[in-house]
Amino acid sequence: MSFVKRNTVLSSPRAGLTPSASQQQQSKQETQLAPGLRPSPTDGRLTTSTGTASLDQLLAGHGGLPLGTCLLVEEQGTTDFSGILLRYYAAEGLVQGHQVHAVAFPPEWRHQLPGLASLDKKSKSASPAPAPEEKMKIAWRYESLSNNANAGASTRGDSGAPFCHSFDLSKRLASSESKGTLNPISVGGVPNLDRKSVGTASPLKMILKQLRAKLESSGSNAIHRLVAPSLLSPTLYPPGCAQPSEVLQFLHGLRALLRLYSTQLTAIITFPTSLFPRSSGLVRWIEILCDGVVELIPLPARLGAAPPPPSGSDPKANEQPQGMFKVYTLPVYHEKGGGGAESGQFRENLSFSLSASKGLVIKPYSLPPMLEDEQEKPSAAPKKDGLDF
């Protein structure tokens, strides 16, 4: 029978085996990510911001658009909410120092991008907290909607640098704020009359050729963003691009580039469903070749409605929903289905609103709560003394 003394350490680590502070700093420097990137909390894949914080939180729990993926934004009607999403996406890339490739846009499009919003610390500190009596007037389920919308909304990366900036539509992006480069890619122009080149130079294939050349010439740490507005629209693309053989080959080639440069390239494409409805077979194939598909459905304007208030007036008036936001597919990469499928937030009825200061905000759609002051007032009809037979 063996006896062991109590309160004695059997083995202790040697001083030489513990990592020093210099070694820890070297390991941190090696794992330091490029500006505007952070790992996904779902599967660790590198993600980048779309420039819209509410859209980042909706992308299957990744907290941003994963690198090597493509997002298709469809829109009904004649509005241009999807174009504003592209501006935020391009402005975020330029501020982070990424290379932005703008299809069918001139170089002057840089001056149409929104500028960085100034932080109003006074307005935040001056707003008092609501009294507990006022909180009791609103049902708990309405109060939890705003908490769920802002839950987990982190606009900073792991290194402390801003991951998603706040932009102001009333301002323009200054040259001092832009750290990246904007590479315009033209698709139209004067048709070539040379018979030898007829049928060989497709505008969509030229987009892939120029994009591939930029990817090969840049370093492995450079991050690229592709902006493709209103795909197949006759105002931006030649009529031959609407052929299924042309557009499907373009999406196949873009998907191959996204998989080949899975740590450098992302893309957002807008698509007008008023010209090409979702019931057609071509649109269904386009949706299959994209990793994520969302749709913007603007609400119809009411006749005789008042004009929208200015951005600095009433904040509640700017939060009125201006359309519905539908999610069809999201980038999912593991057997659990992703964060969006687990929480089921994208399965709810979502709406969006646009303001100059807050940008495009996506949140669950709900009817406003009815307070005591807004209850129905009794009718002022005169009472009759007798009974009518």
Image (cartoon, helix red, strand yellow):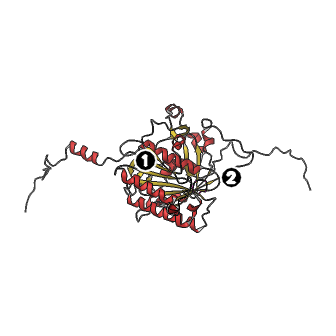
Whether residue 254 appears in magenta in the rendering, the answer is no
What secondary structure is marked by label 1? strand
The residue that label 1 is drawn on is 99
Give the image location of residue 288, x and y in percent: 51, 65
- For this view, does 188 lie left or right of residue 164? right
Give the image location of residue 254, x and y in percent: 45, 60
Instruction: Look at the image and tell me whether residue 291 can be seen.
Output: yes
- Name which residue lies at 40% across and 63% down: 334
- Name which residue lies at 39% across and 48% down: 37
Q: Are marks 1 and 2 in contact (CB under 8 Å)?
A: no
**Where 266 falls versus 305 (above or below)?**
below
Boundaries of the magenta span: 233-237
Nearer to us in this view, 21 or 93: 93
What secondary structure is marked by label 2? loop
| Quarter-of-image position of residue 208 | bottom left
Q: Amino acid at mark 1?
A: Gln
Dominant secondary-structure state across the stretch colored magenta: loop
Nearer to us in this view, 291 or 150: 291
Instruction: Look at the image and tell me whether residue 40 can be seen.
Output: no
The residue that label 2 is drawn on is 300
